[in-house]
Structures are given as C-alpha cells and as structure tokens.
Amino acid sequence: MRVVKEAAERRNEILDTAEKLFITKGYDKTSTNDILDRVGIARGTLYYHFKSKEEILNAMIERINGALITKAKTIASDTSIPVIDRIVMTIAALNVDTDIGHEIIDEVHKPQNALMHQKMQENLVAGIVPVLTDLVCEGEKQGLFSIRYPAETIEMLVLYACTAFDDRYETDGAAKEKRIKVFLYNTEKLLGAEEGSLQKAMINLFR
Amino acid sequence: MRVVKEAAERRNEILDTAEKLFITKGYDKTSTNDILDRVGIARGTLYYHFKSKEEILNAMIERINGALITKAKTIASDTSIPVIDRIVMTIAALNVDTDIGHEIIDEVHKPQNALMHQKMQENLVAGIVPVLTDLVCEGEKQGLFSIRYPAETIEMLVLYACTAFDDRYETDGAAKEKRIKVFLYNTEKLLGAEEGSLQKAMINLFR
DNA sequence: ACTTATAGACCGACAGACTGTCGGTCGTGA
DNA sequence: TCACGACCGACAGTCTGTCGGTCTATAAGT
C-alpha cells in the first residue's frame, strides 16, 4: 500500500535505516534493496530522494559529523572551563563511544568500509582542526603552550589520532594504552606544554 | 585460440594489466572483464589464478610495496652513509615518483580508490616503521637524537606523512611546502634532533 | 618411436545480484 | 477538478564468481 510523506521525513527515514545497515553490515555489503525493503518503500522512491547510493553515504556522514562538530564547538566556546580541560573535552566529544555507540568505531574501520572511513575522517579533520587550533592559541596566550606553527601541528596530531586509534591496527589493550601514553607525551612536546600537564588534565577529568 | 603458460607467468601478466587499469581507472571502475579482455584470457582463467577481484588488488599491492621496502632496506643498511642521510634517503625511496611514476601518487588517492589507498598505506607503514626505528636508534647512539619512545614516535610520523602528503588535500603548492617545512621542524622536535639538522641533510642531498 | 595417462592450464555459458532508469499512478491541497 | 509532488515496480544493463568440461604438455609404459 502507498503511504505518502513529506520529502524531508522520508529522507530522514532512509538515512536512519541506511546508517544502521552501513554500520552493522558495511557499506559495500549493504544493497539498496536492503535499505528500501527495511524502510518499506519502492526502488523508485529511494532514487527519487537520493540520486545514488553514494549520495546516501555522504548525507549520512554529514549528519553524523555535523552533530559531532557542533558538540565539540559548544564545549570549545565555554570560557568558564580552563583551556586545557576544554581541549581534552573537545577531543573526548569526538570519541563516538559516547552517544552513537561503540558500533561505529568498531565497524567503520573494517577494510570493507574504506570509503566510508576515509570520508568520515576527512570531513571530521577539516571540521575539528580550526576549533582546536583556536583553543591552543588561547592556551598559548595564557602561557600554557609554546608553539610556532599551531595550525599545521594540530592537523598533524589530529590526523594521526584519527588513523592510529582505529581498532584496525591491534586489539591488544596494552599496546594501545602505551600508544595513547606516547601520543600524549609527544603532544605535550609539540605544543611546548609542561611534561605531564595534558596527562594530568585527562586523568583529572575522567578519573 | 588457446595459449598455455606457466602459472607464475600468467599471474604476472594479470597483475601487470590490473596494475595499469587500477591506477588509471580506479579499482571500483575497473571490471574483471576489462582485465581479462586486455590480457586475452577467458573469465575462468582469471578465477583459476585468483580467487577474487580483491585478491588481485592485494597481490598487486604486495608486489609494489615489497619492491619499495626492499629498496628502503638496502639503503638503510648501507653503513658507509651517515645515519641522518640514510634516514632521508630511506624516506625518499618511498616517494613513488622515482620509478613507478607519478600516476600512482596522483591517482591512488582519489576518493573512489579508498580501499586501495588504505591497504597500500597500512602495508607500507608496517614495513617501513621497523626500518626507520632501527636507523633512529642508531642515530641516538651517535648522539644525534634523544628520544624516549622511538617505535611509537616513528609510527606517528610515518602515519601522518602517508596521510598528509596525499594530493587529495590540496594542490596549492605553497601550502604544501609549508606543511613539509613544519613537518620537518616537528620531526626534529620529536626526535630530539638539533633544529635544522634534518632540513640541512635534506637540502644537502637533493639540492 | 608411438600410444596412453595425467595433471595443470584454460574456456565460456550461466546463475545470481546489484544499481540506476523511466513511464506511469496515486493523494492531497488549492 | 486540477496540478504537482511523492511514489511505484518492471526492466535494462552490468558485474562478480562458478562449474563442468576441454585442451596440451609432459611423463610413463610398451
């Protein structure tokens, strides 16, 4: 039977379903049939709202990243919190565990989802680098950091973090923990922060 | 008509052809028909030598990266060259421009080739990090560097370099040059090298 | 030297699945 | 009642991977 809805609503229904499927089954392994069966629409309807399967992926990524970046910006602009805490919190806000669930971080990084992964990363890095750069510059004015090329350096750190902290490299908890520790140590070095200052802020916030 | 060849030879013919096509057209847009038409074999023959299209991609990447890593190792083990020069040369050996041609670096990083890109990067990083780590440790013994966590730090630098120096981010020459400069500056900082020492070695070698 | 056997390389028709298209239909608000 | 936006589903075209069977080079037996 035929159910008519407003375009925006249908679009979101499709995106909701696609998101679940892309994340649980992978982008390549999800067929457009899977999506339209689940939404309960016909083939033509799907292609009435999106011009291709890839466009669905793009829209989905923009929705997810848009929300994440908005959240990060909100935290970053709360001047009532010390800069160093805000930096840690901003980064934590991107750790998708919080609200979208572990599934994403676990599933997105499988080899099959390379395209999805690359797009999410590119989009997220572009959005978050300026926010963090501003924060670091603020911290430098307060004498917390000493850094010559903030933008490029932040980009370097963020890009590395995005790639390295994907689970695809190892599941060994110890190696991962060490990697995080070294990452913080190196970050302090690059930002010209006092040794242990970031680590302290982190432990302080998450205990 | 039917031409019989040794398995190894056919395999290489297929890989040669696939390499050209994957690089010029992209992995997704290259069909197995494209490959087998060009090689001049039947469908069944292709699947006699490779069990899937993706396995062709994997074999191709291993071939390319194997050659690159062998070359890098050769340079790295030549103790007649000063360590710092060897480091620069080892990295330079990975810059595919040299023998496989610009095409790869130009084409591999298009969004369509995400899978290929990811696999090449992962494979290359895993191969090159130990080589560079050894070199850096050698340099530390000579008092050139001062570094607490060599392996993780090298990994960080290599991973970043792989991601950042893809052309996908910008074609603006000036921005790219600055990025390289900052990368060298930060590398010196992380390795605990004298400021400008890496840059000097680089300019020295390539003038 | 001449048949016969065998294993490895090769063939191409086919099944099954998938994406995107298109002409046409239905519902709803003006 | 009219028009437009939402919706439908059959269909074309393409793609990957399979399978039963065929060819050929080499080794063995006579």
Image (spheres, coloured by chain):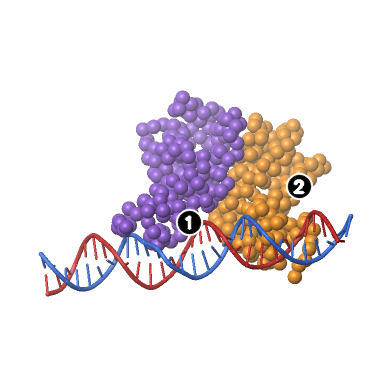
Chain colours: A orange, B purple, C blue, D red
Q: Is residue A3 above or below residue A82?
A: below
Q: Position of residue B12 (x, y in %)?
A: 36, 51
| Amino acid on which the number 1 mark rests in the picture | Glu
Give the answer, above or below, for where A118 lies relative to A34.
above
Q: Chain of mark 1?
A: B
Which residue matches tag 1? B54
Chain of the residue displaying label 2? A
Quadrant hosting residue B186: top right
Measured as percent of width and height from the top left, residue A32 is found at 63, 61
The residue tagged with tag 2: helix, strand or loop?
A: helix
Query: Is A66 rendered above or below residue B198?
Result: below
Does A143 appear above or below A175?
A: above
What number is the disc on residue A70?
A: 2
Amino acid of disc 2: Thr
Rendered location of residue A90, percent (x, y): 72, 46
Q: CA distance from mark 1 to mark 2?
A: 38 Å
Residue at image location 55% in from the left, 40% down from the top = B166
Which residue is more in the foreground, A40 or D7?
Answer: D7
Label 1 with label 2: CB-CB less than 8 Å:
no
Q: Nearer the viewer, residue A105 or B4?
A: B4
Identify the secondary structure beneath mark 1: helix
Q: Is residue D11 left or right of residue D26?
A: right
